[in-house]
Image (spheres, rainbow, N blue to C red):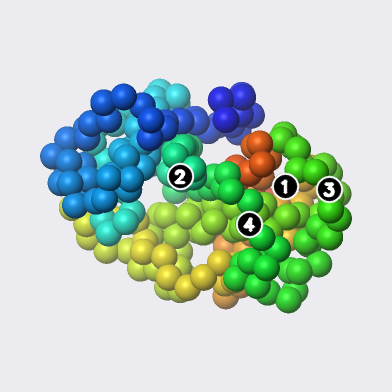
Amino acid sequence: MSALRPLLAAAGLGLGIATVREPGPRPAGPAEAAAAASMPARRRLEFLAGRRAARRALRAVGLHCGEIPRWGRLPVFPPGRAASISHSAGIAVAVARAAGPGLPLGCDLELRPLPRAAARLVLREDEEELLDDRDEPFHAGSRPTGAGWTVTELFSAKEAAWKALAGTGLGPPCLGEAGEGPQGLRPARPTGSLRDLRVGPAEDGLCVVRLRADPARAVRVRVVRVGTGVFGYVLGPSPGLGPSAALI
């Protein structure tokens, strides 16, 4: 994962990484401590690792952040701070952006490949042609240009896009509604499923993920292979959208 830092930095993103095995994991404040206290041991370690990863991602773009409380299951950041967090197999990652308030932000780490049978839970019929039918070894690094996508890659692309489209509270109702949380405007609470998004190929091995109910709401996503898994992250709004459409 550390090898991806230059790739994300070129996109204006900071990367933070933490593991559940780090010694002495401690909450950064009373709100984190209260949230962690009610969790089973394994979930508590994942939660605290995710918060550490988010603070590290923010520091990577020159920002600092204390404790990160939550609203439901969603992190709540102070004004001027935002990060997207993902966990898989005891590793937590986060991405943050220094500039561009309202720009979409999302990531997803999947270190356990999904079976082909999971496609029906992620895709609709008009997306199945994107799947790779070849039985080839899965290699780490950038995916081959023009190759089909695995179920894991498509799931990660949609999951990262889902977080970005729902994250600011400015998305359409089917992606959640904003409200007042402990520190003002809280993130939207996502509803629906990944099948409500449609993914399509773009240039340079990227993909564009659109909201089916409002195709103008779209983001560009890059999916990078990491070992036997993948890491997907949102680069920004899809080209051709106006300034108002970028605020998703």
CA gap, disc 4 and disc 3: 15 Å
CA gap, disc 3 and disc 2: 26 Å
- Residue 22 placed where, x, y %? 36, 26
Tell which tag, 4 or 1, sits nearer the viewer.
Answer: 4
CA gap, disc 4 and disc 2: 15 Å
First-in-chain label (4 vs 1): 4
First-in-chain label (4 vs 3): 4
First-in-chain label (1 vs 3): 3
| Up/down of 47 relative to 62, above or below | below
Amino acid type at mark 4: Leu
Circles 4 and 3 in contact, beta carbons < 8 Å: no
In the drawing, what numbered circle is on residue 206?
1
Instruction: Report which residue position mark 3 lands on.
Output: 136
Tell which tag, 1 or 3, sits nearer the viewer.
Answer: 3
Instruction: Report which residue position mark 2 lands on.
Output: 87
Q: Which residue sits at x=49%, y=43%? A: 89
Relative depth, front residue between 191 and 211? 191
Amino acid type at mark 1: Leu
- Is residue 224 visible in this depiction of the protein? no
Tell which tag, 4 or 2, sits nearer the viewer.
Answer: 4
Q: Which residue sits at x=78%, y=62%? A: 130
In the drawing, what numbered circle is on residue 114?
4
- Identify the element where label 4 is drawn: loop
CA gap, disc 1 and disc 3: 20 Å
